[in-house]
Amino acid sequence: MTDAIHAKIDSMVTSNDVVLFMKGTPLFPQCGFSSKAVAILEHLGVGFESVDVLQDMEVRQGIKEFSDWPTIPQLYVKGEFIGGSDIMMEMYEAGELGELMAQKKVAPAS
């Protein structure tokens, strides 16, 4: 990953409370895992920024190196990598993802 891509990704995850790197967009997810991740965040009622990795191959590869996580989607909350859709689902079902959003004072969706 180039320094420029690292800086771009770092800026995305630090300048937004919640960022979901996904395939597609929240309205038109391009894989089931991204769709599940969007549904969880929408159900929690939190605002989030989405990044369609299919639009930028350097970001698509770079985010995997940035997080040392091999798959998409990837969720970041207040600059911290949380995980992919399976981890999101486990945390959501256990009530932990909602608690995390409250602890981090994540703003609700507008």
Image (tube, rainbow, N blue to C red):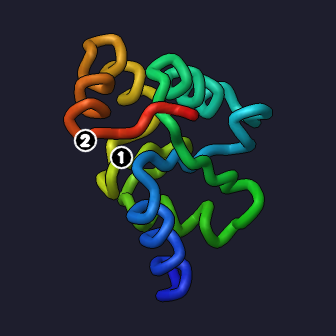
Q: Is residue 11 left or right of residue 32?
A: left
Residue at left offset 25%, top offset 41%:
104
Relative image position of residue 13 (x, y in whole percent):
43, 60
Residue 55 position (above or below residue 31):
below
Depth check: 51 or 105 in front?
A: 105
Residue picked out by circle 2? 104
Question: Which amino acid is tagged 2?
Answer: Lys
Identify the mark nearer the N-term, 1 or 2.
1
Relative image position of residue 23 (x, y in whole percent):
68, 44
Residue at left offset 57%, top offset 48%:
49
Residue at left offset 35%, top offset 18%:
92
Residue picked out by circle 1? 77
Asked which quadrant contains residue 32, the reply is: top right
Categorize mark 1 by other alpha carbons within 10 Å: few (<14), some (14-19), many (20+).
Answer: many
Residue at left offset 36%, top offset 59%:
68
Categorize mark 2 by other alpha carbons within 10 Å: few (<14), some (14-19), many (20+).
Answer: few
Task: Find the distance from the CA under tag 1 to the CA under tag 2.
Answer: 8 Å
Residue 31 position (above or below residue 13):
above
In the rendered image, the residue lying farthest to the left is 103
- Disc 1, SS: strand
Relative image position of residue 29 (x, y in whole percent):
73, 34
In the rendered image, the residue lying farthest to the top is 93
Depth check: 74 or 40 in front?
A: 40
Relative image position of residue 43 (x, y in whole percent):
51, 17
Depth check: 60 or 95 in front?
A: 95
- Disc 2, SS: loop
Closest to the camera, between mark 1 and mark 2, is 2
Question: Which amino acid is tagged 1?
Answer: Val
- Whether tag 1 and tag 2 are in contact, CB under 8 A, the answer is yes
Residue 100 position (above or below residue 44):
below
Q: Is residue 92 left or right of residue 108?
A: left
